[in-house]
Amino acid sequence: MSVKAHYPKALEIRELEQKITSELNLQGFILSRTIWGTSICSDEVNNSFNIFSRLFVGPGPFRFGGISGLPFTGKTGVMAFASHIPDKGGAFILYGPHIGVSNEGKTGEILRQRQDSNSTCCGSLIAGLSAIQNPSTIGEETASDYQQAQVVKMLNAERDQILGADDQVKEVTEKAYQKIHNDLKELIHDCKDALVGKKLYLMGGIVINTNWDEEDYFDIRNSEVIELT
Ligand SMILES: [Zn+2]
């Protein structure tokens, strides 16, 4: 199985759902009083996680992520989310970048429905990788492509390590994970006044997409409860 060759501990979405349910229960969350959010790339392949909405209150999820999964909604997004948490309730956030693994085991691509050949996944991170491989192509930052400019900036800061890696696609994914993780933690810290007395559960990791007719996976990298007092 090609996904497990790259990410041996990755869980299928249904296994992840069971894990989330049991962890939240164990930590004393009442799911009927918990909302959820994601900081995952806008790519529609990631809507396979939408089934988790059945676990939580509201239509869900609140989407912090723009392309690549960076929490582009910023402080305004976290403040809004905080104000939506049910009375005496909590919140769950699933976050991370995504990477395709094709049936042939190739990273950074998958076969999508009604297409004859594979396409890039995550398209934003792979375009960012291509930009740092060819720095002369990096243009001025424009409002019309604001999010991708931030992705390129993030990857360019780690250029040497990325270009020296055996699998550069996996490496940009790891760098994106670190950045999403750090940014989210910082945003939560910055919005702590709005979160006092609310319980948060953060679960971070790498989303692994597969061909359209196969189940997707998630490789957990961090699980933590945050209770601000
Ligand atoms: Zn993407």
Image (tube, rainbow, N blue to C red):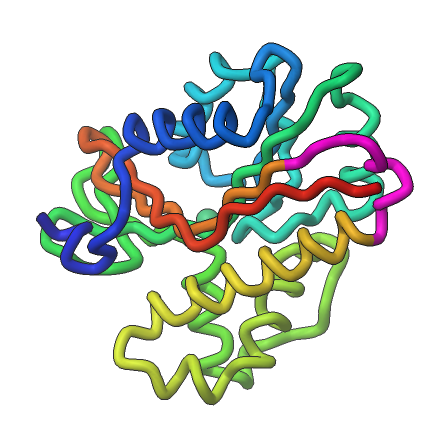
- In the image, 54: left or right of 153? left
From what the image shows, is residue 21 above or below residue 149? above
From what the image shows, is residue 215 above or below residue 146? above
* Residue 210 coordinates in the image, percent (x, y): 24, 42
Does the magenta run of residues contain 143? no
Find residue 5 and report its image quarter.
bottom left
- In this view, the residue in front, 137 or 212, is 212
Does the magenta run of residues contain 198? yes
- In the image, 177: left or right of 186? left
**Res. 2 visible in picture:** yes
Residue drawn at 43 percent across, 68 percent down: 172
From what the image shows, is residue 154 above or below residue 117? below
* Residue 74 coordinates in the image, percent (x, y): 77, 48
**Res. 41 visible in picture:** no
- In this view, the residue in front, 27 or 186, is 27
* Residue 194 coordinates in the image, percent (x, y): 88, 36
Residue drawn at 84 percent across, 41 percent down: 229
Q: How many marks?
A: 0
Q: Residue furthest right?
A: 193
What residue span does the magenta drawing correspond to? 190-200
Residue drawn at 35 percent across, 43 percent down: 218
- In this view, the residue in front, 168 or 96, is 96
From what the image shows, is residue 185 above or below residue 165? above
- In this view, the residue in front, 174 or 148, is 174
* Residue 87 coordinates in the image, percent (x, y): 79, 15
Residue drawn at 68 percent across, 58 percent down: 183
